[in-house]
Image (cartoon, rainbow, N blue to C red):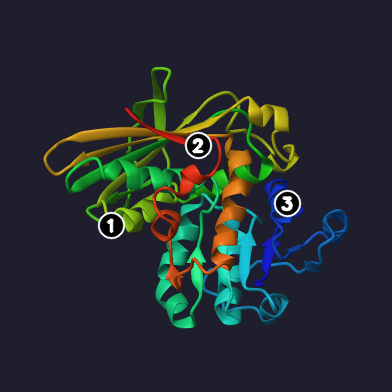
Amino acid sequence: MKKLLIYGAAGYTGRMAAERAKTLGLDFEIAGRNRQMLASLAETLAVPFRIFSVDGAVDAAADAGTVKALAGIDVLLNFAGPFAKTAAPLMRACLEAGVDYLDITAEINVYRLAERLGDEAAEAGVMLLPGVGWDVVPTDCLAVHVAQRVQVPQSLSVALQVPGSMSRGSAMSVSEIIGAGLMARVDGHLVLTPDAQPRDFDFGEGLVSCAPLSFGDLVTAWHSVGVPNIAMFVHVSGEAFPEGDLSLLPDGPTAEQRDAHRARAVAEVTGADGMVARSMIETVNGYSYTPLAAVEAARRVLDGERRPGFETPARLFGGGFAETIEGTTITDL
């Protein structure tokens, strides 16, 4: 049986993923930086643990210690954010160690890095598959679905609804997304769009204003669908985007808070003939969806569903992958 390593397992979402992997009976170990927290979780789950830290420049060579720490591992599932600090060194180590890399990031620069490393990964026989959580599984599959409703799709707009409170890790990742600048895909190329304006979208309860933001779909939808023009938006309700010292935030919403807020995204595509199609995906709360989707993706990769190089969830697993997670539905609008 091939072995999975869950990195960042002591964190809010990583812990839920480790518990899910245990429930499914996967052969896995957990890893991260906090020995005390990992040791406690490892004892609870009766699994081995590894302690190592990662932090390196995007273009730095693979760290020998990190490569060694991946010995005996076939698939790495990274939950340690902000991913701007962990993705590059872990990807580089995976390329060196021959380990498939998965993560749950929403940070666009991680997708751009994986895309750039795609040829090198293919040569090494390694798959780079970022975004196997709520970012970007539902929206990637939604993009594939709605694009099939028109002839020759030319433009795609995707809007996410962010309800309820945000975890500390997500808040830090959002800071990285904002810091990357506003971007869109125009005629197949990623370009800065600092003057991008909000748009109104309907998530089922009337039109609401959505702000432009650069999510990973600007990369994944390009590969999964091939649509040349892509824009991303987000609607924030409640206190979803916190301010102040993000390190003081709680780990994440409670189970009751997650159950109170389902997650939705809307996609709109325009065909070459001017026809417009819209569809919406609705799932359980994003924090509940992510460990389920991520561990299912890892399970499939362990079972041999893999292609070396840069991949996207919908292209690898098919456009129906998002709906394999219980409580997920796509509705044509």
Badge 3: how crowded within 10 Å, few (<14), some, or many (20+)? few
**Mark 1 sits on what residue?**
189
Looking at the image, residue 328 sits to the left or right of residue 276; the answer is right
Residue positioned most to the left: 273
Location of residue 96 with respect to 198 vertically, above or below: below
Examine the image and state in which quarter residue 260 appears: top right
Which mark is first along the chain, 2 or 1? 1
Residue 257 pos. (x, y %): 68, 28
Residue at the spot 65% in from the left edge and 28% down from the top edge: 259
Residue at the spot 59% in from the left edge and 27% down from the top edge: 261
Residue 8 pos. (x, y %): 71, 57
> SS at mark 3?
helix
Residue 221 pos. (x, y %): 35, 51
Residue at the spot 51% in from the left edge and 49% down from the top edge: 106
Specify the quadrant that holds the C terminus.
top left
**Mark 3 sits on what residue?**
23
Question: Distance of mark 1 from mark 3, alpha carbons?
Answer: 42 Å
Give the amino acid at mark 3. Thr
Quick check: marks 3 and 2 in contact, CB under 8 Å?
no
Location of residue 170 with respect to 86 vertically, above or below: above
Residue 124 pos. (x, y %): 49, 81
Looking at the image, residue 102 sits to the left or right of residue 8; the answer is left
**Mark 2 sits on what residue?**
328
- Examine the rendering and report whether any part of residue 254 can be seen: no
> SS at mark 2?
loop
